[in-house]
Image (cartoon, grey):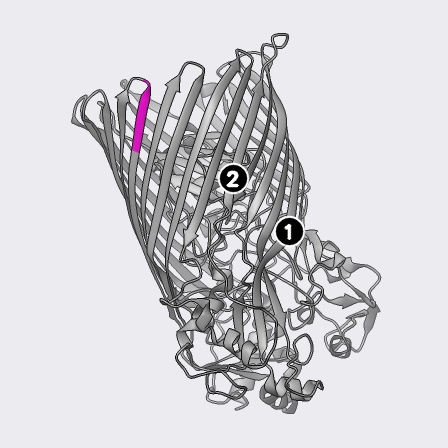
């Protein structure tokens, strides 16, 4: 699908993110922002993944984040000319994706001066109350946001050189209003502190809400130069600078767990297109970019307290209720510092000859800096089996659980650093076999250099690997190496029969490789920082470690097989219908195997009993590239218009996305866990991905009403996504009524949201116009918690004795759990999480309540 400037200016965008409107492409779906290091960059899901496995380019330059995945640079929608969303079957010139590709082009200047000035404003008075997280009679949570947009383009030398500049400033005052239930828990925690039960803390302030101010500046400058009729130049630079206060604070966590996040990203692109001859075109591109992020924590107490009511989701960082936040979740660890530099050189040559159009190219990316740091100060995390209210009546139990639940994280070296190079070469030919048949065939080869080097060291110095060898444990043998087998054929066929001149049939096949983001296994890269701590040849040597992480030497680059087939029919010049089938088979995605001493990991040097093994054998995490997944989808796309009054797009997707995962799997995203490392492919561990949406419908369009009024809308409806109830320790699926839950026993709420925009353009003379507008989001004020339900069974009202016994059969009927109700339906365990907002910025699958936005745009 091609999304144009007109779409970006007319379709209501709840988060002012260009990714929001990518949903006009069939086969895409919204996902929550999942990157705390690049706020407000909304990913676009395709193929049942989270969207972090995409290839993204801006003006031909690579814009993919290689540490966390997804978009690297945020761009104001007013600076975008158009972008193409390709959900499958990309050409051979596209690399580093196992899913979709987004190709974005920025606006350019012309011989006529042109520009826009726009203002968008929202306030709590224009928003409906969120009854679950902010119910009456609590004061309504404060909120305001203003977007200021300015663009200007025109000639530097008419007919020769042009410029375009844009600036968008975002001034937001969001907040988190604590629910009455959480306020009661915080008040109980404050009482425990005032009673002297929390060492070093005598009081804990409990606010009604916490402000989350956000400031963002998006700037872009582009210069175009027509050197002559054979050579065209482009120079563009962009910047994204933002600050978020109280980042990471969520509904179940106090402000001490937050941080001030500051991100600064700058990039530059220089490209040239040169016509060697009329039938030969050469394209050269140089790109450079740098990212610097810091996270300054609100608290430096040296400890944190974690209670069950806080652990509402595996995808947020709110494991800690009070105290320091180490930013470690059940999925991954988020950095407190990030630095990244990327330099790109790309050269392509195209030759048109008769019925052939051939292209060859090379793409080289050099990332001398891809590093940062995770929190590594010494801290104690105290995990409690009960909530603060439960301890008020039994303070002695609080003291006992405080001592029993404390785990010390020793001080360490949290730094990680890589120097990576990526090389890709390709050749492709489009052959017009007959007037009715086009055949596209190509071959691509990619490889990466230095993927497993960290801080200048290889995994051969990993202390965990040396410890395994010293203990004679044959868990892995050797170290991983860069994979050179990324040979990717691409094939496409288009057929238009003479008997059906307005109908096209198409089919394709391709392999797509992509080294996934590094954050999932960053602990293995950090491990080599302590490579010089001492020798580890014999058990007990100073360099041997009690726990660690290693990467399997049989590493292969993850890849996906795409098989597609479909047809497209134009009824006339105004109406078009297409139907397509997509199959994507994923192979070699990352997985985490966690081996426990005395349970799944043994050394022959010590007696086989659990006590001896745990005393001498480490707990080891092994990262392997052996996961499998599949995505099958049937897509229908209808596009039409009725004169100049109405134009619209309708997409329907029927799909199924499945993968292996212990708790909840993702396709080509974070490192999926394995429940039992000795049986990694158990039948029960294969199920829907977190983005599995069987049915999805999107309607978008613009209608011109009497009186010059223009209405535009985007309406989305999709079936519920899965979530999984975990054990209290978040390491496996919960057991209910004697049966371990599957990956598809529980689903959230179907998502339905309709947004609409009304504007009345007013023209002045020939070139000036003024367009005041009103945008209404979630006009039916539907509660859209999505899959954001309580996922830790210990955070639900169930008996403690059943939790400790590992089999939950009842739910509590009152506060002290003296009354029990047998579980006869899993729906009794479906409880929306306390905070229905998202973690890193305005959400997409967790819909906002009704909200209105007013604004005005002046254009010339």
First to last magenta residue range: 279-283
Tell me which residue sits at (55%, 77%) in the image: 469
Picture quarter containing residue 228?
Answer: top left
Q: Position of residue 463 (x, y in %)?
A: 48, 76
Predominant SS of the magenta segment: strand
Inspect this view and state whether residue 662 appears: yes
Position above or below: 822 against 827: below
Q: Quadrant of the C terminus?
A: top left
Q: Nearer the viewer, residue 148 or 39?
A: 39
Locate residue 677 relative to residue 426 in the image: left or right.
Answer: right
Q: Residue furthest top?
A: 499
Secondary structure state at the residue bearing disc 2: strand
Near mark 2 (Cα within 10 A), the count class, few <14, some 14-19 or many ≥20, is some
Q: Which mark is residue 628?
A: 1
Number of labelled discs? 2
Locate residue 712 relative to residue 172 in the image: left or right.
Answer: right
Q: Which mark is residue 488?
A: 2
Q: Nearer the viewer, residue 812 or 582?
A: 582
Secondary structure state at the residue bearing disc 1: strand
Locate residue 624 relative to residue 272 in the image: left or right.
Answer: right
Q: Position of residue 168 (x, y in %)?
A: 32, 44
Mark with earlier residue (1, 2): 2
Position above or below: 664 against 219: below
Q: Position of residue 731 (x, y in %)?
A: 65, 69
Q: Position of residue 455 (x, y in %)?
A: 36, 67
Picture quarter containing residue 276?
Answer: top left
């Amino acid at each position: 699908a091609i999304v144009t400037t007109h779409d970006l200016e007319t379709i209501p965008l709840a988060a002012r993110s260009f990714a929001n409107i990518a949903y006009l492409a069939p086969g895409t779906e919204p996902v929550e922002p999942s990157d705390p290091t690049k706020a407000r960059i909304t990913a676009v899901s395709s193929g049942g993944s989270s969207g972090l496995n995409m290839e993204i380019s801006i003006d031909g330059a690579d814009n993919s984040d290689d540490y966390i995945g997804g978009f690297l640079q945020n761009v104001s929608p007013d600076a975008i000319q158009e972008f193409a969303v390709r959900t499958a079957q990309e050409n051979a010139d596209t690399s580093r994706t196992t899913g979709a590709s987004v190709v974005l082009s920025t606006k350019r200047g012309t011989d006529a001066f042109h520009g826009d000035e726009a203002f968008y404003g929202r306030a709590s008075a224009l928003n409906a109350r969120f009854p679950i997280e902010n119910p009456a009679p609590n004061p309504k949570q404060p909120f305001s946001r203003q977007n200021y947009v300015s663009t200007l383009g025109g000639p530097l030398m008419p007919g020769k050189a042009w410029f375009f500049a844009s600036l968008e400033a975002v001034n937001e005052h969001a907040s988190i209003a604590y629910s009455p239930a959480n306020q009661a828990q915080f008040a109980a925690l404050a009482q425990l502190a005032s009673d002297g039960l929390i060492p070093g803390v005598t009081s804990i302030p409990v606010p009604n809400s916490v402000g989350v101010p956000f400031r963002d500046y998006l700037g872009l400058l582009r210069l175009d130069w027509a050197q002559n009729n054979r050579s065209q130049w482009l120079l563009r630079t962009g910047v994204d600078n933002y600050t978020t206060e109280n980042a990471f604070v969520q509904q179940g966590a106090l402000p001490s767990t937050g941080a001030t996040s500051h991100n600064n990203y700058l990039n530059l692109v220089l490209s040239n297109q040169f016509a060697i001859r009329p039938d030969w075109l050469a394209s050269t591109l140089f790109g450079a970019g740098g990212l610097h992020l810091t996270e300054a924590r609100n608290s430096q107490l040296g400890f944190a307290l974690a209670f069950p009511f806080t652990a509402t989701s595996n995808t947020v960082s709110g494991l800690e209720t009070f105290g320091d936040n180490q930013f470690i979740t059940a999925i991954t660890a988020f950095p407190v510092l990030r630095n990244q530099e990327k330099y790109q050189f790309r050269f392509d040559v195209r030759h048109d000859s008769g019925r052939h159009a051939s292209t060859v190219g090379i793409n080289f990316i050099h990332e001398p800096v891809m590093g940062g740091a995770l929190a590594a100060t010494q801290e104690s995390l105290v995990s409690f089996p009960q909530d603060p209210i439960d301890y008020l009546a039994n303070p002695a139990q609080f003291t006992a659980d405080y001592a029993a639940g404390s785990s010390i994280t020793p001080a360490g070296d949290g730094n990680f650093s890589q120097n990576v190079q990526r090389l890709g070469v390709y050749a492709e030919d489009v052959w017009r076999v007959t007037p009715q048949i086009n055949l596209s065939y190509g071959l691509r080869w990619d490889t990466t250099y230095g993927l497993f080097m960290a801080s200048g060291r290889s995994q051969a110095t990993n202390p965990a690997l040396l410890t395994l060898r010293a203990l004679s444990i044959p868990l892995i043998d050797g170290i991983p190496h860069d994979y050179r087998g990324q040979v990717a054929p691409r094939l496409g066929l288009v057929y238009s029969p003479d008997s059906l001149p307005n109908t096209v049939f198409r089919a394709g096949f391709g392999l797509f490789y992509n080294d996934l983001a590094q954050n999932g296994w960053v602990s293995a890269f950090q491990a080599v920082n302590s490579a010089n701590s001492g020798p580890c040849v014999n058990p007990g040597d100073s360099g041997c470690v009690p726990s660690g992480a290693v990467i399997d030497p049989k590493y292969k680059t993850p890849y996906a097989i795409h098989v597609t087939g479909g047809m497209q029919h134009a009824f006339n010049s105004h109406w078009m219908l297409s139907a397509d089938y997509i199959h994507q088979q994923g192979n070699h995605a990352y997985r985490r195997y966690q081996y426990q001493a005395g349970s799944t990991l043994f050394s022959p040097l010590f007696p086989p009993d659990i006590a001896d093994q745990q005393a001498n054998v480490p707990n080891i995490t092994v990262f392997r590239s052996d996961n499998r997944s599949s995505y099958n989808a049937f897509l229908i796309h209808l596009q039409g218009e009725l004169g100049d009054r109405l134009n619209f797009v309708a997409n329907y997707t029927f799909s199924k996305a499945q993968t292996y995962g212990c708790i909840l799997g993702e396709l080509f995203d974070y490192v999926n866990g394995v429940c039992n490392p000795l049986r990694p492919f158990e039948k029960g561990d294969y199920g829907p991905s977190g983005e599995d949406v069987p049915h999805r419908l999107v309607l978008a369009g613009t209608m011109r009403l009497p009186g010059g009024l223009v209405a535009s809308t985007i309406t989305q409806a999709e079936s519920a996504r899965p979530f999984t109830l975990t054990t209290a320790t978040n390491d496996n699926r919960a057991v209910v009524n004697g049966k371990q839950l599957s990956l598809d026993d529980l689903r959230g709420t179907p998502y339905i949201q309709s947004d609409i925009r009304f504007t009345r353009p007013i023209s002045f003379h020939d070139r000036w116009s003024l367009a005041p507008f009103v945008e209404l989001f979630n006009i039916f004020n539907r509660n859209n918690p999505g899959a954001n339900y309580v996922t830790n069974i210990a955070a639900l009202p169930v008996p403690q004795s059943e939790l400790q016994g590992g089999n939950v059969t009842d739910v509590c009927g009152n506060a002290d759990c003296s009354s029990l109700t047998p579980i006869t339906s899993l729906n009794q365990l479906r409880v929306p999480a306390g905070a229905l907002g998202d973690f890193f910025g305005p959400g997409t699958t967790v819909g906002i309540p009704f909200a209105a936005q007013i604004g005005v745009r002046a254009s010339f």
